[in-house]
Amino acid sequence: MTSAIFGEFMGTVVMILLGNGVVAGVLLKKSKAENSGWMVITAGWAFAVMCGVFTAIACGSSDAYLNPAVTLGFAVRSGNFSKFAPYLGAQLLGAFAGAILVWIHYLPHWPATPDATAKLACFCTIPAIRNAASNLISEIIATFVLVFVVGAIFSKAVVGSGLASGLAPYLVASLVWGIGLSLGGQLALDVAIAHPDRVWALGHVAGGVSGVDSGAYTEEQAARYDAAEAERLRLVSRTAPRAELLDQAIEYAQDVAANCAPLAVQAVKAQLAEDACRDLPDAVLEARRIAREPARRPDLAEGARAFVEKRPAQFAPLPERSQQQPS
């Protein structure tokens, strides 16, 4: 069975399944792709669009719009709105079906992920910094680029007598990848959790960042930020209610303890403690020295073997510290 409406439906199902699927893989806990980053998400979405377009064409839609904004853009450009309503309905139904398949595919990972925002982000866009006017303008710019450049790709000035058969999906996928990389936003680099009552301060004298309870920080000439502002500035990765703060911090610590090489964690903690007394050039040199050390340690070999064998790494525990006996 093939028809234009069925093609739009199936193409959107595949696009959302693969597109939302890569986001879920990166964000959900205990996924093999967890924390693999923005490059993976943008590339995954590019492939999702490419596969969706191929599917739509194969199932009967030579248009393969898959997106209400693109559908509306082509309707306005041509002056023919006869396809808009049926295509819109097929695309919305396809998006619902694709999202349900993502939910089913990652079913064990939803309860394992305590961060509600991360789970929500698998199905919708969330601004890195909430500013309604700026967020709206950003969406308008990205959507304009999508619709305008798609129109340019298929314009007579570009294609002449027509694109080579099968080339169009690759070009549109490249466009989506480019939009994701250039206009998609930024990711946090550090991991920290704060409760809403915490105040973060940048000490101009000490030149550091510290988290303190409300009203307890008195350092002179310090800029103070509440938890929401600290999250916006990427001083913390997320905020958590006070009642959940300890549980989330412990969960993160357990994840580090279970999945990170003990020697590497030990080296990082030692460096953080010692860098407080170093200047920047010395700290950079020490970081480079530490980065070379694991190559001479068994943890690297075990980590590589575990990756190849697709199993959890079994790192050797740290040697116990000798306890000094009181005299």
Image: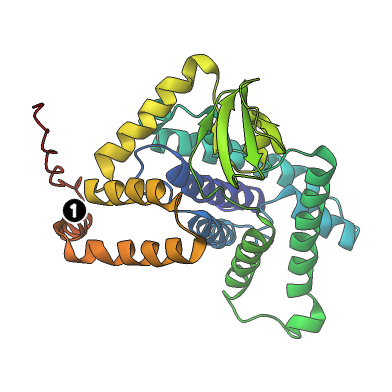
Q: Is 57 located above or below residue 221 in the figure?
A: below
Front one among 111 and 218: 218
Query: Percent x, y for residue 229?
Result: 69, 34
Front one among 51 and 287: 287
- Extreme residue in the front direction: 327
Q: Is 266 displayed left or right of 175 in the figure?
A: left
Q: How is this picture coloured?
A: rainbow
- Extreme residue in the bottom direction: 160
Residue 83 appears anywhere in the view: no
Number of numbered discs visible in the structure rendering: 1
Which quarter of the figure has residue 31? top left
Front one among 241 and 281: 281
Residue 147 appears anywhere in the view: yes
Q: Which quarter of the rendering shows the C terminus?
A: top left
Q: Residues within 10 Å of mark 1 (few under 14, many from 20)?
A: some
Q: Is 238 located above or below residue 246 in the figure?
A: below
Front one among 136 and 12: 136
Q: Which residue is mark 1?
A: 306
- Extreme residue in the right direction: 79
Q: Is 12 located above or below residue 248 in the figure?
A: below
Identity of the residue drawn at 24% across and 48% down:
261
Identity of the residue drawn at 21% across and 52% down:
310
Mark 1 secondary-structure assignment:
helix
Identity of the residue drawn at 62% across and 33% down:
200
Identity of the residue drawn at 46% across and 34% down:
103
Query: Percent x, y for residue 215?
Result: 65, 20
Q: Is 65 displayed left or right of 300 in the figure?
A: right
Q: Amino acid at mark 1?
A: Ala
Which quarter of the figure has residue 131? top right
Query: Percent x, y for residue 119?
Result: 52, 33
